[in-house]
Image (spheres, grey):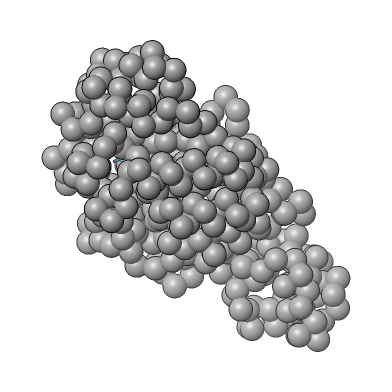
Amino acid sequence: MNLLDMLPEELESAMLALGEKKFRAAQVFSWLHKGAGFDEMANIPKPLRERLKGECALGGAKIIKHQESRDGTVKYLYELEDGERVEGVRMKYKHGVSLCVSTQAGCEMGCAFCASTIGGCARNLLPGEMLGEVLAAQRDCEERISNVVLMGSGEPMLNLTNVLKFIRLLSLPDGLNISLRSVSVSTCGLPEGIARLADSGLPVTLAISLHAPNDEIRQKLMPVAQRIPIEAVIKAARGYVRGTGRRVIFEYALIAGVNDETAHARELAGRLRGLQCHVNLIPLNALPESELKGAAPERISAFLQALTDLHISATQRRSLGADIDGACGQLRRVYNGGEV
Ligand code: SAH
């Protein structure tokens, strides 16, 4: 029994099943969602604390490595209770503090530019483990974490039941109370998952990793494009906008000589016409393992200008944490001896 996986009503049932009073659930919940361990639960009688320790697990995450960049960005390596490791990044923006959360240990999608996928996917994270990442980072940070982006390792749509529960846990008023409007879910574009997310009624932002204006280029970068054509991804995005009334974000990492021509920008603009969306241009964070290199700054500016000229809302994402193992999955690999 992992306590951090539980919604308040589930924790109540668990307390009753242990023969405890219902009000203990709210007390324990409050400690859990402050990131406290069993020994810190000061208003819980010691015998109950010992019982909880013996019969339940927290099921969270603890920080085992903390790397701080000169710009204030912090990269975390977390350890889960079975010894599996995942990473996350805390970033400071004008609008608040944002935490990037991993949804799986590793990833099976195989994108050519991404370090998280190099050793495949070890396992899905449980809701409490994702929450545990946020709780541990919040304990480590004086300012309130206001935004959560599911852009760490893993493909959220392949672990969607756990992801949806995690998002509910994040937003509980007696817990972290994070506004769902400040939560983004990033996917490589799996239409069934996108439809399920829209149907969940959770008002989160959907981000789709597109990275190419057509199937030919996309297939070179993202194996998933061999199964799912770009038109199907964009159709799913249109469905999301229709179903939720919320605009979709497209992520596009600019890679030198691959997808960074202004002709690509124009082709992309054509595909996105009439869709309520925003394009986030990301300078590629080049991996030592890969031949792919980031586009030159003037190419990025020209690409951005071409989109803007065609009335596609677009911005270039600020690059943070360049002096720490920035790209997704790099830190975990370093700490697993490069083996994962
Ligand atoms: N699996 C999900 C979420 C995790 S990746 C997805 O595909 O969206 C989060 C974002 O980082 C994605 O847009 C991904 O394509 C991008 N990304 C991964 N490696 C990168 C790198 N080396 N440089 C720039 N962006 C990268």
* Residue sitting at x 66%, y 69%: 6
Q: Position of residue 140 (x, y in %)?
A: 57, 46
216 w.r.t. 303: above or below: below
Observer-nearest of 277 and 57 = 277
Say whether residue 269 is left or right of residue 33.
Answer: left
Ligand 1 lies in which image quarter? top left
Tell me the quadrant of the picture where the C terminus can be found.
bottom left
28 w.r.t. 176: above or below: below
Observer-nearest of 18 and 265 = 265
Question: Looking at this rendering, what residue extends furthest in the left direction?
Answer: 291
Q: How many marks?
A: 0
Q: Position of residue 33 (x, y in %)?
A: 68, 58
Say whether residue 47 is left or right of residue 154.
Answer: right
Q: Position of residue 20 (x, y in %)?
A: 82, 81
Does residue 288 show up? no
* Residue sitting at x 40%, y 24%: 316
State the image quarter where residue 26 is shown.
bottom right
Tell me the quadrant of the picture where the N terminus can be found.
bottom right
Say whether residue 327 is left or right of residue 93.
Answer: left
Observer-nearest of 35 and 276 = 276
* Residue sitting at x 39%, y 61%: 105
9 w.r.t. 97: above or below: below
272 w.r.t. 28: above or below: above
Q: Position of residue 240 (x, y in %)?
A: 53, 45
Does residue 81 show up? yes
Say whether residue 37 is left or right of residue 217.
Answer: right
State the image quarter where residue 104 is shown.
bottom left
* Residue sitting at x 36%, y 32%: 271
